[in-house]
């Protein structure tokens, strides 16, 4: 690592000697205080539950400025990537650091396309699950099982293995998600087609049947592609940190990504768009648009447990830049499918209008987030609510792989080992059973 840009002095009120700590400056964003030698120098650890003030790594992939509402992939604003590039270009960018030229894109897309099929034995593995199982439970098993099918790319320390594992994961996730869906509804699996785009192929595997030809709508294809781009990476969030932590042990890439899938399942993380749609369903059952006023009162009531799902964001203290793009896509999809008058979507638009105009939400910057709009779009396309998080995992796999590869290539990376503030009983002796 380069010499410190400057130093910070840590002083103590108990008379202990002061300690100087190196401070490093990134390209953009907050400076970081290097505390790696803090324990050796002071015998102390830092205490940071949730790691909210801790930089766990050096990264050149994704940058977020929550106050400005800014998201950059490799320096490119998400607004430009979502409107001027497709998902394959975005994948190439995250993996290799630069946008591809025409030839690079063609070769990369071809490579991914050639790996979209999965081993036939995966069908029998899938049959071991109950058809009513949550898709994320199924996906956690399927992704982890890939390491049992592709033994030739499980050495995480081999760059070639990591690259082919990355291509396989990106290529096969749409196939696995579609298989999980088809299994849940009792329909035959649909094989991938090499003549379709990445997003088009996913829609075809999801909704085609052997009975008749399924034509992919260009509007829905673009919408799906945009969902993938907007969810491709999001800096050091819970699931990405899980992938890095898991990968730091030297486990294979498939296992590390499976760990990320499991983490993403949580309702506070990847399950947020599912929670947002379930909130709309509950509100619709309660009376729909006519009950919005009463619902908003409950949301504002501090003593109420009612929450407004799909609004606000842990990182963005301004409007989520992805939400603006997804709002546009949402309107395009509803227009294409003629669903603006559908009761559920009319309810969503009414709730959106109130949240964007009501001082209570505006002052607290509780704007609709990407989960709110992506959930509406996926529901309109026909993707069941229970599958939303699996689609999220499909898109985020690219970011996870890029982050994992970056970590392993970092000369300073070590197996993760967080510390603790122990507040349990100090050492004591075991008494004979008769004296307890």
Image: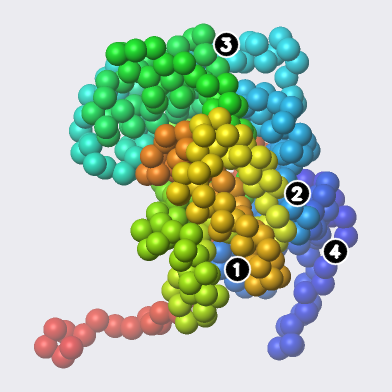
CB-based contact (under 8 Å), mark 2 and mark 4: no
**Callout 4: helix, strand or loop?**
strand
Which residue corresponds to mark 3? 110
Name of the residue lying farthest toward the left: 434
Whole-Å distance between the Cαs marked 3 and 4?
49 Å
Residue 160, image x, y percentages: 56, 20
At 70% from the left edge and 13% from the top edge, which residue is drawn?
A: 104
Circle 2 packing at 10 Å, graded few (<14), some (14-19), many (20+), is some
Which residue corresponds to mark 2? 70
Q: Is residue 197 left or right of residue 214?
A: right
Residue 135, image x, y percentages: 34, 40
Q: Is residue 252 left or right of residue 16?
A: left
Viewer can see residue 75: yes
Nearer to us: label 3 or label 1: 3
**Callout 3: helix, strand or loop?**
helix
Which residue corresponds to mark 4? 7
- Compare marks 2 and 3 and give the one earlier in the sequence: 2
- Compare marks 3 and 4 and give the one earlier in the sequence: 4
Nearer to us: label 2 or label 3: 2
Whole-Å distance between the Cαs marked 3 and 1?
45 Å
Residue 315, image x, y percentages: 65, 58
Q: 105 above or below 293? A: above
At 51% from the left edge and 50% from the top edge, which residue is drawn?
A: 346
Q: Nearer the viewer, residue 134 or 123?
A: 134
Circle 1 packing at 10 Å, graded few (<14), some (14-19), many (20+), is few
- Compare marks 1 and 2 and give the one earlier in the sequence: 1
Which residue corresponds to mark 1? 48
**Callout 2: helix, strand or loop?**
strand
Whole-Å distance between the Cαs marked 2 and 4?
29 Å
């Amino acid at each position: 690592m380069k010499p410190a840009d400057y130093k910070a002095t840590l002083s103590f009120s108990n008379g202990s000697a002061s300690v100087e700590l190196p401070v490093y400056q990134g390209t953009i964003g907050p400076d970081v205080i290097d505390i790696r030698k803090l324990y050796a120098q002071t015998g102390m650890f830092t205490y940071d539950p949730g790691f909210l003030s801790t930089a766990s790594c050096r990264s050149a992939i994704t940058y977020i400025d929550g106050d400005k509402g800014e998201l950059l992939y490799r320096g490119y604003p998400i607004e430009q990537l979502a409107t001027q590039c497709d998902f394959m270009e975005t994948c190439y960018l995250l993996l290799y650091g630069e946008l591809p030229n025409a030839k690079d894109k063609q070769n990369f897309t071809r490579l991914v396309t050639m790996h979209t099929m999965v081993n036939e034995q995966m069908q029998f593995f899938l049959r071991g699950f109950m058809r009513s199982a949550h898709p994320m439970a199924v996906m956690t098993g399927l992704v982890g099982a890939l390491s049992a099918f592709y033994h030739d790319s499980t050495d995480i320390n081999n760059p070639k293995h990591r690259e082919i594992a990355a291509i396989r994961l990106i290529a096969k996730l749409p196939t696995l998600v579609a298989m999980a869906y088809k299994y849940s509804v009792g329909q035959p699996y649909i094989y991938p087609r090499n003549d379709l785009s990445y997003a088009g192929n996913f829609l075809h595997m999801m909704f085609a049947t052997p009975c008749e030809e399924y034509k992919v709508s260009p509007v829905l294809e673009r919408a799906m592609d945009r969902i993938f781009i907007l969810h491709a990476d999001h800096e050091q969030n819970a699931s990405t940190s899980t992938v890095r932590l898991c990968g730091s042990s030297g486990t294979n890439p498939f296992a590390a990504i499976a760990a990320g899938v499991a983490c993403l399942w949580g309702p506070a993380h990847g399950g947020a768009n599912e929670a947002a749609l379930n909130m709309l369903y509950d509100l619709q059952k309660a009376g729909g648009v006519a009950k919005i006023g009463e619902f908003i009162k409950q949301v504002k009531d501090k003593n109420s447990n009612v929450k407004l799902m799909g609004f606000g964001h842990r990182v963005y203290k301004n409007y989520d830049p992805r939400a603006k793009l997804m709002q546009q896509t949402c309107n395009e999809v509803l227009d294409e499918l003629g669903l603006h008058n559908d009761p559920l979507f009319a309810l969503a638009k009414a709730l959106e209008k109130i949240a964007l105009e009501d001082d209570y939400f505006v002052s607290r910057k509780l704007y609709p987030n990407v989960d709110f709009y992506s959930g509406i779009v996926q529901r309109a396309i026909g993707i069941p609510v229970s599958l939303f998080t699996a689609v999220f995992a499909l898109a985020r796999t690219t970011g996870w792989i890029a982050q994992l590869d970056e970590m392993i290539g970092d000369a300073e990376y070590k197996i993760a080992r967080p510390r603790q503030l122990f507040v349990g009983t100090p050492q004591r002796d075991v008494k004979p059973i008769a004296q307890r």
